[in-house]
Image (tube, rainbow, N blue to C red):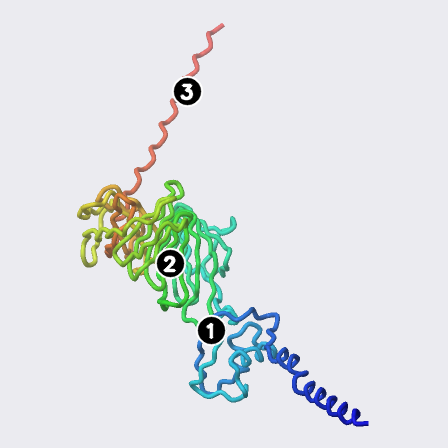
Amino acid sequence: MQAAPMQTVFLRVVFACLLAFGPAAPSIAQSAPRLPSVLPSPSADIDYTAKPRDTMIGIARRYLIEGQLLEVQRALWEHNKLKDKDQITPGQIIRIPENWMKDDANSIQLAHVEGDVQSKGQPLRPGAKLAPGDDFKTGRDGYVTIKLSDGSTLMLQPGSDMSIAGVKKSPLAPAADAQFTLKNGRVEATVAKRSVTGARFEVRTPIAVAAVRGTKFRVVADDEKRTATSEVVEGTVEVNDTGNLGSVSVLAGFGTRVAEGQAPIAPRALLPGPRLWTGLRLWVRRPVRLNFTRLAGAVSYRLLVARRADFADVISETLLTTNEIVLPDLPNGPYFLKVRGIDDLGLEGRDTLADLVLSLDAPAAPAPAASPAPAPAPAAAEPAPAK
């Protein structure tokens, strides 16, 4: 008879244990946040400083992939372990996974097109919208200037072949992460400033990669010689070969060359700019032939002629083997010239700029065409003999 009370006590203890420990496993499973399918597993965080009148819902809508979805908004405040999603204060740091942010790269624009420029076999026109995967080919007289949403520009020179490997920009980042592939030819880039840990700007060739975070530089890919050269005008460029045999930091005023299967050579100082005339020069006679001082160490020179001082609309380019400038037949007006020396490695040196105004005399009038000689008069017929 005493067993019943003992059994009751035992059952009560078991029931109490079930209440205490039984629900634990389900509650732990429920506490783990479940990400919506549109968001990947979080990567490194970007710190966002809350502004007056900010809300977590508003932040999610502005910056996150599919941020209008409730489950995406919930993922953001759970990631920040907020007790109250509706109460954040100005200055509060909100952690946003970088790979949750929408792509705000916008479009890539063709800022300028000159001469023969094609993409996928079709001619390109200024203002066209471009996207990753698009390619460009310039003919012997073709130039194209590409402009990114952060203001960075890239000018493709004649006889070049390049494609856009990828462009991506976080809405909180000041600059776009951009990669271009230069298969053959020459390109000049002016890159908006990037932070040390921020977005990169890369020009890849089959031989080497030039990576920058804000600078002005030139890259040449020579498919025939299987080499690539990089010249730095401003800032610093990291250059490595595609086989990862070596890497060099190239400072402003220096350049490097990479041959297939080799590491980049030690940076070499670029040639100084050639000595041209100063001030505005007026030229009034034909032909237009101007000399400049020979540059020690130069094996050739590159001459560019443009209608604008920023050289966004180059109209003529010539590779000179002497120190004489011979301009093509151009209409009267102001022009801007840029000359640089090229050394024995193919590294192009610093530019010298000059202004020129053409006010040429009218071309000599063509000689009048000679009048055709009069046809000889037919011979008089002899009288028929009398019968």
Whether 121 is drawn above or below 15: the answer is: above
Q: Position of residue 157 (x, y in %)?
A: 38, 51
Q: Amino acid at mark 1?
A: Asp
Residue at image mark 2: 211
* Mark 1 neighbour class, 10 Å CA radius: few under 14, some 14 to 19, many 20 or more: few
Whether 184 is drawn above or below 370: the answer is: below
Q: Position of residue 3 (x, y in %)?
A: 79, 91
Residue at image mark 1: 45
Q: Closer to the camera, 364 or 340?
A: 340
Q: Position of residue 11 (x, y in %)?
A: 74, 88
Task: Give the secondary structure at mark 1.
Answer: strand
Task: Give the secondary structure at mark 2.
Answer: strand
Q: Position of residue 337 (x, y in %)?
A: 27, 54
In the image, taking residue 288 as reference, residue 147 lies left or right, namely: right
- Residue 378 is marked as 3
Give the CA separation, mark 3 to mark 2. Answer: 85 Å
Of the residues under marks 1 and 3, which one precedes in the sequence?
1
Of the residues under marks 3 and 2, which one precedes in the sequence?
2
Q: Nearer the viewer, mark 1 or mark 3?
A: 1
Specify the quadrant of the image occupied by residue 151. Answer: bottom left
Give the CA separation, mark 1 to mark 2. Answer: 24 Å
* Mark 3 neighbour class, 10 Å CA radius: few under 14, some 14 to 19, many 20 or more: few
Q: Residue at x 24, y 42 (%)?
A: 299
